Image: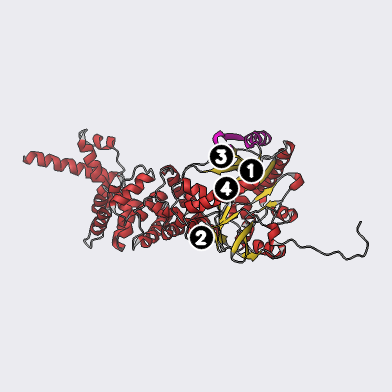
Amino acid sequence: MARHGHAYPQVEPRAVDLMDRRVAKVPASASVRSALDAARSAHARVVTDLRAAAPREDLERAAAWGFGRWRWLDLAHVGLPSVAAGAGEIAVRRLLQDGAAAVLVHEGRRAVGIVEPSPRPATSATWTAARLERPQGPEGEARLWLLRTAGKLGEAQGQAVFAVGGFVRDLFLVRAPARVPDLDLVVEGDGIAFGRRLAEETGGHLVVHAAFGTASLEGGATPDGTRIGRVDIASARRERYGMPGALPEVSPASMRLDLGRRDFSVNAMAIALAPSAWGRLLDPFGGQRDLAARRLRVLHPLSFVEDPTRIWRGARYATRLGLKPDAGFSRALGLALKAGEYPALSGQRLHAELELVMDEPDPWSVLGLLLGWGALRIWDPGFRPARRSRVRLRAARSFAAWAHRAGVAVEAGRLALVALLFDQARATAERCLRRLAVTGLDAARLDSTIARSLARRVGAEIRRRPSQVAEMLRPAPDAALLGAWLCGGRRARARIEWFLGQGRGARPLCSGDDVVAAGVPRGPRVAQVLALLRDLRLDGRVRTKDDERAAVAEWIEALTRKGESR
């Protein structure tokens, strides 16, 4: 029995008491295969030196994918802090709170264990709940109602429900996001069964994707009739990638493991929605801390090898949210490019990422990042940024701005491809288009030689009537027109802009029937006369329908005289 007033010694746990001892020390120069053999021999789950550690699971995946000759250090978390075995718990916890992925424990120059972060809530539930409940207008009120309803339904079914993804991330941003993100919910249990119950409650339509244990709810509304945006619902799961770039095999898991399979720490946070845990934040990987530091950090070095489309996502987040990739991001990018081609990654997925980039508020800055990172080698290993590649992107941005002001429809993704592939060898451009499964665009239309020749001809100082400019540009495919604008001078650009904005759409007021009624015989002569009227209109020589009728009469008269002279 404790005695009142007696001073008892306080025993602080030491690093040796907190660590996992299942580590194997491996030389930094060792290969993945050698490190894996050492881990298996020692029954270790982690291989280390004094500043780096790699999970055995990552080594096994790399070896299975054919990367056994890589250095194991390439797959490791590097620059980890290290403490002596006798260091106190407080010192270890401070290092983890400061953002360390793990803390190594050593005795002399020998690593004897590792301490990893524990999945504790990062903030109080009250503080996070206040963010959730902040007034945000009718749309925000509807979303809050949905979150509370989802939490209650899940608790009634005995399943924990969490809000995840961009919605949670944006709650902790200092500045408001440019757009409201879709709502993602994750259920520890049967997400599809939960989705059906939520659809009943909201009157929405549920689309089920059974292979991934996910569903999408659309068309739901609150009791007062306020529409609810799209809601994506998933079962908490782990993912296993059989090949780099392949779609993952999924299996049920805890929320903690679900967060661990995500792309970046800022997206690996979840908020509990059950009434009994409302507002509790799960942040096992320090996403809130990374947001505060404006840091974009991958969760593990093989992240981009698993799924290279995460590189495109990273460029979008870096640009839109003002996040700066850390050193681990750069190392993961290097591994993805080193891995070479990705036969299991479909062109449709790569093309979809380009379309998502073009939907961003500033797509041209995103493309500039990808270009600078060398990420377009994922399209084709032969892709190399040319000296003028950035110039082309800046020109494409200017053209897109002009088209928007002028009301000229331009397919943004097509414009981006023209700019990015303009200075590539034709064979490289052809392989990129094939890899992206692009339809309606081929390397012949992207040929920079043709575009440059067109720019020179249309930009020549010769005085040309508008109809002559239109005649020169009309046969060119859109890709060649865009390419000519990108590389052309001021006069060439002005004439191409005129053609796209006015010249290409010019039509005579008279119809084919009008021309026939005026005496032109049916057949090819009708198209010939309509083309003449169009050119006269372009040159300002006819303005009204009566002017056109008079021009048709003159044409018939001239044709008649010509026939008589024969």
Q: Earlier in the sequence, mark 2 or mark 4?
A: 2
Please name the amino acid that badge 4 sits on.
Arg
Please name the amino acid that badge 1 sits on.
Val
The residue identified by callout 2 is 27
What's drawn in magenta, residue-wise? 190-214
- The reply to whether the C-beta atoms of the residues labelled 4 and 1 are less than 8 Å apart is no
On the image, the x and y values in percent for residue 481 come to 31, 52
Q: Earlier in the sequence, mark 3 or mark 2?
A: 2
Tell me, yes or no, whether the highlighted magenta stretch contains residue 206.
Answer: yes
Q: Earlier in the sequence, mark 4 or mark 1?
A: 1
Please name the amino acid that badge 2 sits on.
Pro
The residue identified by callout 1 is 186
User: Mark 4 or mark 1: which is in front?
Assistant: 4
Q: Earlier in the sequence, mark 4 or mark 3?
A: 3
- The reply to whether the C-beta atoms of the residues labelled 3 and 1 are less than 8 Å apart is no
- The reply to whether the C-beta atoms of the residues labelled 4 and 3 are less than 8 Å apart is no
User: Mark 3 or mark 1: which is in front?
Assistant: 3
Mark 1, Cα crowd under 10 Å, few <14 / some 14-19 / many 20+, is many
Rendered image: mark on residue 134: none
In this rendering, position of residue 121 left or right of residue 460: right
Name the element at disc 4: loop
Mark 3, Cα crowd under 10 Å, few <14 / some 14-19 / many 20+, is some
Farthest-out residue, left: 566
The residue identified by callout 4 is 261
Query: In the depicted view, which residue is nearer to us: 344 or 200?
Result: 344
